[in-house]
Amino acid sequence: MKNKSFKDILISNAVPIIFLVLSAAAIPLSGFTTSYLIQEMVTRMGRNCFLVLSLLIPIAAGMGLNFGMVLGAMGGQIAIILVTDWNIVGMQGLLLAAMISTPISLALGWLTGEILNRAKGREMVTSFMLGFFMNGVYQFIVLYGFGMVIPVENHAMLLSRGFGIRNAINLQGVRQVLDKFLMVDIGPIHVPMAAFIVIALFCLFILWFNRTKLGQDMRAVGQDMAVAKSAGIAVDRTRIIAIIISTVLAGYGQIIFLQNIGTMNTYNAHEQAGIFAIASLLIGGATVSRATITNVFVGVMLFHLMFVVSPMAGKTLMGQAQLGEYFRVFVSYGIIALALVLHALRRRMDKERERQSLRGGDAPAPANGH
Amino acid sequence: MKARRLVVRAAALFLFVALGVFLFVNGKGHDILLDNKTVTMGDQTYEAFASALISLDGKKAVEIQRRERLPEMLVGKNHVIRVEVMNRGGKVIQTREEKFSLGLDRTWLISLPMLISGDARWIQVFKTGEN
């Protein structure tokens, strides 16, 4: 195994290192205490890690960042709306929401998989556009379907015209149900242990899944579809399964996220879920073609550390908290753009390298490390 | 082989739906209005009492005064209510415990005077606009 030079390590971990440096500079400026920051990180990791973990399987299958995870988030949100309307509360409400979101996310995941199989090599942009398209369908259902076709018992959830769900819903019945189910106090820090157990189970599932036949098939498909196909792997089916798993898990992740927040921004919550989850993963050092569980945890921590400290740091530096707010939105989109540019560059370099090797010339070292 | 797979899938689907129904029934939250007002049903009048201690499902009792209506929340289908009627001196003069089941309706009105008097209509679905 080739030893990596310090420069190689720096280059391959440039994004997390930059964020670490930025955070280290912003923390003293923000004036937050250590215990406050630790509490915030623990809460936010419990809230977001599941969503980000749902992105790993499609990356392993070579489908890049699943921007289509917003479809799963929509499924989760529709389930949460129904459960809130029926007034199913507590853990039962949360489990029922997960159960309702499952068939919705399954169907949406299958649809996404079928479409992405027709757009091989352009999965990310296709799933991104599919997210926009399905957002329209979601808005149509929630804005017109609820109260008109789908009966709504709780009229407080409806717009004043009598149909369509309000912009914000109070999720009182399921608010922090999972978090409070097993809250452990470690000194001044409240740790939502149940949420972390669920996340740990998900991590174990991913590790186990990677060792199964299907998991191995996915990795084979991710490395080279043509080789996988010639080895007898049902490439299209495997890719559809990867997207279905990701979409269903994104639905669960959105439910976990919303129960922690306690309110739902009906028409925007899913959009934010996709962008922030993908940005978190990339900040953790993942690339479009390679992501690990470690990337998830590092990314969520660094991204949310920036989220917490940047408004206050902006206020201290410029006298305006809004500056930090702009910064974190800029960072979210910027990091995704940067990752996509780097991915395109690496692909171009890899192709160039292949061409060089076919010509018999000296091939430069592979750019993406696999 | 195909038939076996079909049976397994049908069983899994049945279990999935059954679990969903179970969660729906047992997780359904109901708004309960504990009502201590004088009620007239037909030619029968049930007088409100001075005060009472109400305990739902063995939880800590709440005190209700004459002409008061207290909101409570119950989750699930089957419950127990315990009413201890007190005189003006605060001494318990009558106790009654009843088991009851809630349907799928959201809001229910429990008339405490009717409950104490043994009228079977002491619990009713509360429709918005009623008082």
Image (cartoon, coloured by chain):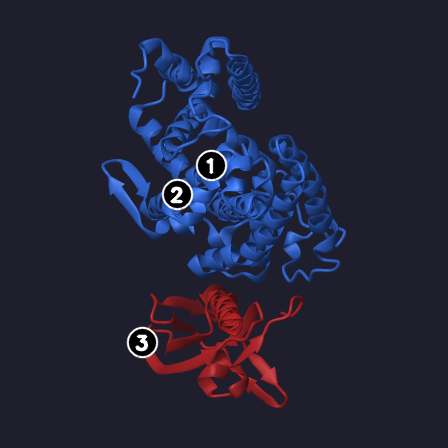
Q: Which kind of residue does numbered mark 2 sit on?
A: Asn
Decide: is A113 above or below A314: below
Number of marks in the rendered image: 3
What is the x, y in percent for residue A262?
Answer: 49, 45
Task: Report the side of A129 relative to B80 (left or right).
Answer: right
Quarter the N terminus of chain A occupies = top left
Q: Nearer the viewer, residue B41 or A323?
A: A323
Q: Are marks 1 and 2 on the same chain?
A: yes
For image coordinates 45% across by 77% down, the residue present is B49
Q: Secondary structure at mark 2?
A: helix
- The chain drawn blue is chain what? A
**For mark 3, what is the residue?**
B91
Q: Could you tell me which chain the residue with mark 3 belongs to?
A: B
Q: Quadrant of residue A156?
A: bottom right
Quarter the C terminus of chain A occupies = top left
Which one is closest to the eye, mark 3 or mark 2?
2
Q: Crowding near pointer 2: few (<14 within 10 Å), some, many (20+)?
A: some
Q: Which residue is the extreme one toward the bottom?
A: B43
Q: Secondary structure at mark 3?
A: loop
**For mark 1, what is the residue?**
A60
**For mark 2, what is the residue?**
A210
- The chain drawn red is chain what? B
Q: Which kind of residue does numbered mark 3 sit on?
A: Lys
Residue B68 visible in the displayed image: no
Q: CA distance from mark 1 to mark 2?
A: 9 Å
Residue B58 visible in the displayed image: yes
For image coordinates 55% across by 84% down, the residue present is B121
Q: CA distance from mark 3 to mark 1?
A: 72 Å
Q: Nearer the viewer, residue A151 or A125?
A: A125
Q: Are discs 3 and 1 less than 8 Å apart at CB? A: no
Decide: is A136 above or below A163: above
